[in-house]
Image (cartoon, grey):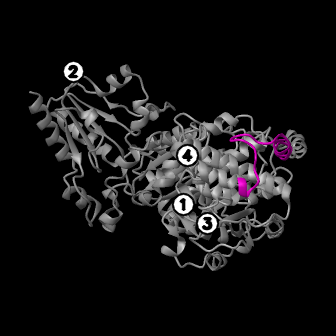
Amino acid sequence: MADVTPGSAVKTVPAPKDQHLRDLADCIRFLSMDAVQLAKSGHPGAPMGMADIAVVLFKDFMKFDAAAPKWFDRDRFILSNGHASMLLYSLLYLLGYQDMSIEDLKTFRQAGSKTAGHPEYGHASGIETTTGPLGQGIANSVGFSLAEAIMSAKFGKDLVNHHTYVFLGDGCLQEGVSQEAISIAGHYKLGNLICFWDHNSITIDGDTSLSTSEDVIKRFQAENWHTLEIDGHDTDAIREAIKAAQAVTDRPTLIACKTIIGFGFPTKAGTHKAHSDAPGEEEIAGARKILNWTAPPFVIPEELLKAWREIGARGAKERAAWEARFKAAPAEFQRRINNELPADWRNAIAAARKEFIDSGKELATRAASGAVLNHLFDAIPEMLGGSADLTPSNNTKAKNQTEIHPGEFDGSYVHYGIREHGMAAALNGIALHGGLIPYGGTFMCFSDYCRPSIRLSALMEIRSIFVMTHDSIGLGEDGPTHQPVEHLAAMRAVPHLGVYRPGDPIETAECWEMVLEQPHRPAFLALSRQPMPLLRKEAGTENKSAKGAYVLLEAEGGERKMTLFATGSELHLAVEARTVLQAEGIPTAVVSMPSRLHFELQDAAYKKSVIGTNKARVAVEAAVELGWERYIGDYGRFVGMHGFGASGKIGDVYKKFGITTDAVVAAAKESLAEVG
């Protein structure tokens, strides 16, 4: 093992067992420290400490081809400790990824650069997921490895047979989401998942003993993981550990790699000063002397760069053989990995609409969503459902879906357990892997528990689908702890996240249609517990929700004087209030707004036609007002929540907070009076 006394500088480095491998690793080390120094900020310590592991992994084990970064059957490499981003960027340059140049490394952490301070999906090839918030990468990796196992069970190992490799640090393992993730992975026996723990015993504040006494190895063993402990600078030990990990197919593996943070620094190696400080020219000069590196900043000796480029190209033959098999693959497999939906999938939406209209019954939108899924799953078999232990309440399991069990992946429904955050992060990994369309459910109040992963899905612009039921005080007796009040506003504040709150079964079907036709937008479906009347009974398949808002009922008997805005379970209150106002001679329109984001994407003329020119307006929603101001204006009124909820029967709770038809009518008259 590397001789490291936590918190003490390591002024010497262990001699390499293979000088060529050390030289390859030093390419990563010096690119990393040079980039951090030029940027005057960054995290050089982890890239320098993990460089030896990266060399062995990519040289001898990783299945990939730098010339074809989207090859579906490539191994996935996830940098969970995303602050170590220069390790990944250095690898991409050295391996020959065409969209990562030496100039990109020189613009590390600069505005507009693809080499951001933490890896961002979509900025450059080879960045498999956005990491930075610690723990997200290991949690994403559960989704990656689960998706591989499911696709392999469906289409065979000739087409799908790869590993997910993860680098993670002490910080990742201290974040709570990591526990949810390793528990899921161990339970489902994800033998294709191999993690390397950068066990350097250092965090920003200092030695990890400041904040934890955990036995990490025992923790992983308790969760059914295979564990190994090695010197993270011993290339022979690294190689043998990876071989041993690959041989274990019924459990994921953690390889605990004892490393020296800032390996090679003369005064900062092994200390927290190597974690996130720019090293300084003197420290870099000392590292050059210790590691016998004579090349100037950002220059890789020709023979070493050639060796790295050969590593980047060594998978070309295997990739070409796979592509030949792909040409003979089932059409469904080709369609799935090309991210194409079946040609006739919209027929499922039409069938669900017809079912709702034929029945004419009141239906909670969570139940309507379940009915839509019954049709969708048969039409789109790549849909992968799941729930955080609320399947009967979320209505997320279609009637023809089969459950996935530990080590048995020929199904389409996942029980994530009471792990909302881990589930959401896994959904992101599944979506990023490709070949499946993941959705997962929980109560909307618990979106707080998984908000970081939801936010990252929006940042990455991927189709993760979050089915959030029990979306208001309509939850009733469970009381304010389970009644979301501010959550709609919080989720609508996330850029690029599609938040959908349908007001009846037809709108529910339309929202699902909107979700599925957008492969680059995550979805947050807010669905009711309580039944709602069928407000839309017209024939046809026009998706009126597609523009985010529309006039459900236009004013009658003259020019519009009042506009009532509503969503979800309060839409029928607006409809009932309109009936009262119309009877009193007040021409009133009802606007349904199932998706504020989609409405904001429309042109000014359409928005004006929906909102109207009249100034008397009321919005009704069992949530906080935040955001409605832009629609109701200076003379408008809001009927909704001005505090937390309460326990009791659903109707009683609505009355307690004044969210009733009478309250909407009264608010409308107040607005009219103020307008004059």
Residue at mark 2: 559
C-alpha span from label 3 to label 1: 8 Å
Q: Secondary structure at mark 4?
A: loop
- Seen in the picture, residue 98 relative to 156 is either above or below; the reply is above
Magenta segment, which residues?
289-311
The amino acid marked with disc number 1 is: Lys
Q: Earlier in the sequence, mark 4 or mark 2?
A: 4
Mark closer to the observer (3, 2)? 3
C-alpha span from label 1 to label 2: 70 Å
- Seen in the picture, residue 148 relative to 9 is either above or below; the reply is above
Q: Which mark is on residue 182?
A: none
Asked if disc 4 and disc 3 are in contact, CB closer than 8 Å, the reply is: no
Q: Secondary structure at mark 3?
A: loop
10 Å crowding of disc 1: few (<14), some (14-19), many (20+): many
Where is residue 385? Give x, y as percent: 60, 56
10 Å crowding of disc 4: few (<14), some (14-19), many (20+): many
Where is residue 493? Give x, y as percent: 39, 43
Asked if disc 1 and disc 4 are in contact, CB closer than 8 Å, the reply is: no
The amino acid marked with disc number 2 is: Glu
The amino acid marked with disc number 3 is: Gly
Residue at mark 1: 273
Mark closer to the observer (1, 4)? 1
Q: Which mark is on residue 270?
A: 3
Residue at mark 4: 117
Where is residue 303? Give x, y as percent: 86, 43
